[in-house]
Image (spheres, grey):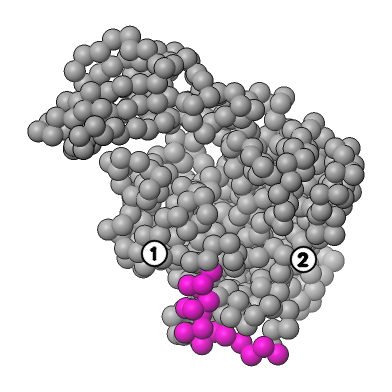
Amino acid sequence: MTRLEPGGIARTFIFSSNLADDAPHYPAGDYVLDYEGEGTFDFGSNVTVVSAVPGRQVLRVVPERNGIEIDIVSVNSGNYLRNIHLRMPSDAPADEVFNPAWLGRIRPFQAIRFMIWMTGDSSEVFMPRTWADHPEVDDARWNTKGVPVEIMVALCNRLGADPWFSIPHTADDGYVTQFAQYVAASLDTGLTVYVEHPNEVWNRSYPHQYGDARTAGDALGFTPAIQDVPWAEEPLDVAGMRYHAVRSCQIGDIFARILGADRVVCVLATCTEVPDFSDDMLAFRDTSHSLDPPEVAAHIDALAIGPYFVIDESINTPQALLAMGIDGLMNYVQTQSVPDAKRYMARHAATAAQHGIPMVAYEGGQGLGTPTFRNTEVDALIQKANRNPRMRDCYDDYLAAWESMEVRGGLFNHLEESSRYFDDSCWGALEYIDQPRSEAPKYDGLMRFIERHAARPGMEPTVGLGAGSRGYLEVFRGTARSIRADVASNPSRIPVSGVCSPSTGGWRGQIEGSRDGCRGSAPRKLAVAERPGGGVSPPV
């Protein structure tokens, strides 16, 4: 803060939006305000200055709804205020970046998708074009340009979690290259990198990236004749998705070149409700001559969907939902919403398997919103459903569907780990960071799923092959010892060595032999092709 206008005040609130159930959820105690320069601070009524010396003040905070108010009321422009840091009450080192309580809640998860950190709440808040626009650690705030790559990498290294990066749709190749170079130099080498073109390019709620993709696809000649895509609302939508597919390949290829193909999973995200988009994108040949080879499927390592369980349009009215009540709504979710989501999962899984790649979830969970209307009673009902103990059972059924034989889903990302409920928006697994697990049925459901898999650490990956199809490696925790390949009803076992990443698509190791004596490595994804008369061929 270099200067203030006469009578001016620079004001900020911390924790002011963290108000689940109208109660504050941040710690009481002594906070430390460190700064450089000279100026005068003032604080809200719930803050008492315990001690103050130049460059440091100790603030005793009593939590209240409005959070912690910090005002700058004067500045010495010759030695202006800068490098202002507020540290929470904690035994953590003074340079700790992350809230230890938050680290504890997310530590069990195997991957972290940084969509909101990289593109903002609406997927297009942060729109950097060149590396000169990238967020930096020394930025005053990390909610104006996004969170720096240094912080994302540090978090994943700290947790041993695979990063999932959502590259903004405006970023040029130079941006992608320098981002990937930092990741290559700084991320632990044992971690797998998931990378995607930005969140939900097809979503008209994000008009910039939706419109830009359609324009770019049309300019490249990707727009089909209307009679060739009877399933699409507009041919330009198909052009936009084809551009999205090609750009996803380009981004993935840059990362693979810099980090090595064995460390990168190039993700192609698709529209769950329109499976034809998946078919079209993975079958598309780039006619703009920017891909080598031109087939999109040759560059993609995983197909990603957002398989939310939702309220069907046929009952999405205030009258119908309020007539259900909480028991009726929970019954509906278990008997209708979750099975509907499974059908979408299976449809996309079949497309992914046809192209020899796994299916993952870029996000998912409950999506019991009412986008076409606002009704306070319905909002209250939906919030009540999200807090209902039966929601844990819904998550049990939902995640069981995800790993069922019909779906065989890989890495699953829940949309948010913690966020306050408002209206019908109940995305967080937790409503606040230190919410007890017993009061958070969605978080409990996710943890139960993780714990079930942790209790089975030597699960063998399987390759399931259908007649004339390609198979893919289904990855679980642990060290792989063999792959079971069922080919032409004649099972064989292929000894392997190597380590499986905790998520589908991260196989690194060697195939050491088979019934046919083939050898080879599968650094990026394992695909086994059926041979006439049975047997298995080397990875393709």
**Disc 1, SS:** loop
Q: Answer left or right for 359 relative to 64.
A: right
**Disc 2, SS:** helix
Q: Residue 134 in the image: x percent, y percent?
A: 33, 54
**Between 131 and 266, the one nearer to me in the picture:** 131
Q: Residue 110 in the image: x percent, y percent?
A: 58, 42
Q: Main secondary structure of the magenta part?
A: helix
User: Residue tagged by mark 2?
Assistant: 347
Task: Tell me the magenta residue range.
Answer: 210-227
Q: How many numbered discs sit on the rendered protein?
A: 2
**Between 464 and 348, the one nearer to me in the picture:** 348
Q: Residue 137 in the image: x percent, y percent?
A: 31, 42
Name the outermost residue toward the left: 78
**Between 251 and 142, the one nearer to me in the picture:** 142
Dot 2 amino acid type: Arg
Residue 122: numbered disc: none
Q: Residue 302 in the image: x percent, y percent?
A: 60, 62
The quadrant holding residue 177 is bottom left
The quadrant holding residue 484 is bottom right
Q: Residue at x 45, y 70 (%)?
A: 250
Q: Is the residue 455 above or below the residue 161 in the image?
A: above
Give the quarter of the figure containing the C terminus.
bottom right
144 falls in the magenta region: no
Nearest to the eye among marks 2 and 1: give it. Answer: 1
Q: Is the residue 286 above or below the residue 154 in the image?
A: below
Q: Residue at x 58, y 80 (%)?
A: 236
Q: Give me the C-alpha separation between circle 2 and circle 1.
A: 32 Å
Q: Residue at x 54, y 59 (%)?
A: 199
Dot 1 amino acid type: Ala
The quadrant holding residue 352 is bottom right
Does residue 172 show up?
A: yes
Residue 171: numbered disc: 1
